[in-house]
Amino acid sequence: MGKKHLSEEDIKARYITPAITDAGWDIKKQVRLEYAFTAGRIILRGNITARGKQKRADYVLFYKSNFPLAIVEAKDNNHPIGGGLQQAIGYAKALDVYYVYASNGDGFVEQNLITGEVRELRLEEFPSPEALYHRYLNDKGITQTEEKALLEPYYYIPNYKTPRYYQRVAINRTVDAVAKGQNRVLLVSATGTGKTFMTFQIIYRLWKAGIKKKILFLADRNVLVDQTISGDFKPFSGKMTKVTNKNLDSSYEIYLALYQQLTGDDGKEAYLQFQPNFFDLIVIDECHRGSAREESAWRKVLDYFSTATHIGCTATPIETKEASSLTYFGEPIYEYSLKQGIDDGFLAPYKVIRIGLDKDLEGYRPEAGKVDKHGYEIEDREYNVKDYDRNLVIDDRTRVVASKITELLKKTDRFSKTIVFCVDIEHAERMRQALINANKDLYSENNKYIMRITGDNGEGKAQLEHFIDEESTYPVIAVTSKLMTTGVDAKMCKLIVLENNINSMTEFKQIIGRGTRLLEEYGKTYFTIMDYRNASRLFADPAFDGKPEVVIDLSGDDPVDEPESETETEEENEENGNEQDGGVISETNGDYHTGDTDGFDDEGEDKPRKYYKDSVVSSHSLLAPFSLKALYHRLDGKLNQSHPAPFSLVLLLLHLKAHHHLAAHQ
């Protein structure tokens, strides 16, 4: 039988694999056949999920376990020798591999992605591991120090996790950059993609290679440090210490600290106990926050240890007049986006329910001389959704929001972990009370069913660890304002409620990231966002890169049901962690008070900071009905009102008649 009649698998078995092994590649240790490097996008059909196709390379050749050196793509003999070359190059770009081969069994076509050279080889001319490795060293101009870092393996023990493809690329690029002498490095990877694991492997390899000896891991929230110590950094036990009580013990090699532990009054800063050259590597977690500000009190820690290599890690680099990740660190060494994570099947897709309450859509202007329930005259101006719960409190609105959250949970799963983001701490407390009233049955069974987890509340913060523990049933509903926007590893979060005003793309991405982690063994394959503040308008922003599966718009009177999706396959304060100098996670109290005690502005006139109304009456009892139409999300993220067929993802917006739903009496 001639080659033309053989299948691709036959061509591989008879010609390509023997040529590779004859060149000296170990089939058991160095050759990975049908190498799948993505998990396959999660496809939603209603509430049923399935996996799409994985991306697979026919052969990936590894010089060492952490160092893939070549990709080979096979075709049957009816294709030209180089027929699979372009496909292989696509895989190579994703995997950071520089030598690409294609074959149909007659020979090989090789492309060197470093030099751009293309040449044809006979089967017996396929390069050996050592020959290809030394070509790589020469083509890249690798120094002895860089080679030492290059060959340093990952930390691994039996049953320990191995890096995914994007994690390996991020780790290798960062280690390589540091070995080359780059002193400022920025690593950008979406929430839920394992940044702390990547950070651990980066530190481990540089430390084991002897390139970095004294290492500081900096964070601005206690939970981030504690999660890191008990989680990914656990193998450093014995060599690692957490800075507490501003005491620094110089006998350790790996230090984990809060900025707040290191800074203090002038002349009393704890970090001054060390010489400026004590640390040779500093890793800054969530580097888009406090230290990104040039005038930040925490920036002086980095400035003091300026001779060290600084590696910044974040899902959301910040670029404002006050703070710039890129100005400090430079362009990212590697970026892995939310969209990539969802497409690869490593992050959970999500649905969005947007609910427009009548006062949010209409606005509210009080009649002349109108007073709130405490007897204070309400300032005469137009109030809109940005004012609600910050300047004007409408109790009925809070009750409606709580009832809609409860309605959705009752139709899906009342024990789905839920985070409700509120305007401030005072709003969070009122929302907690409203949710308790809407869920009296479950709250009476266990008072941890609903907890306010905010920076000022010790009882709530103590439950944060239980909330993120997938084995722990309670708390179920966490009501917060800023404390849980970032860094909280809540794998089982299935519902995110946006009841806060979000104008920052950085904060928006961080909040969305609370739900993106997958936990399939526990049934977490997607999550839902319930949006009361039109924060999901930011999906249309060019800076947002992970569009939802489906969005529906509802009025306050419409029943809340989980959206049906139509997705095509691929083929188709120190302990509180409150920032003190303007970072984005600073938590506002909202002039916290409960009951009938009102908050006053102690400076100036006797005037409340918030007006309180049980309800407000619309100027008309029924909003003009919206027209019913379908909007389709194009591949470029824009909306199109024409036919859905050309586009790969349908974004269905059901504009339904919005009835007045709030109380009719003042």
Image (spheres, rainbow, N blue to C red):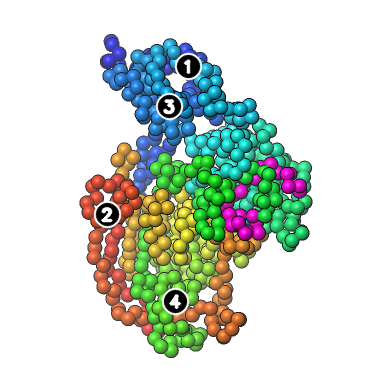
Q: Residues within 10 Å of mark 3 (few under 14, many from 20)?
A: few
**Quarter that holds the N terminus:** top left
**Quarter that holds the C terminus:** bottom left
Name the residue that disc number 1 marks.
127
Name the residue that disc number 4 marks.
394
| Circle number at residue 275 | none
Q: Closer to the observer: label 3 or label 4? A: 3
Q: Amino acid at mark 3?
A: Gly
Residue nearest the viewer, comparing 193 with 603: 603
Q: CA distance from mark 2 to mark 1?
A: 52 Å
Magenta segment: does it hold 293? yes
CB within 8 Å, label 3 to label 4: no
Q: Amino acid at mark 4?
A: Ile
Comes first in the chain, label 3 or label 2: 3
Q: Closer to the observer: label 1 or label 4? A: 1
Comes first in the chain, label 1 or label 4: 1
Name the residue that disc number 3 marks.
116
Give the side of residue 508 with respect to residue 202, left or right.
Answer: left
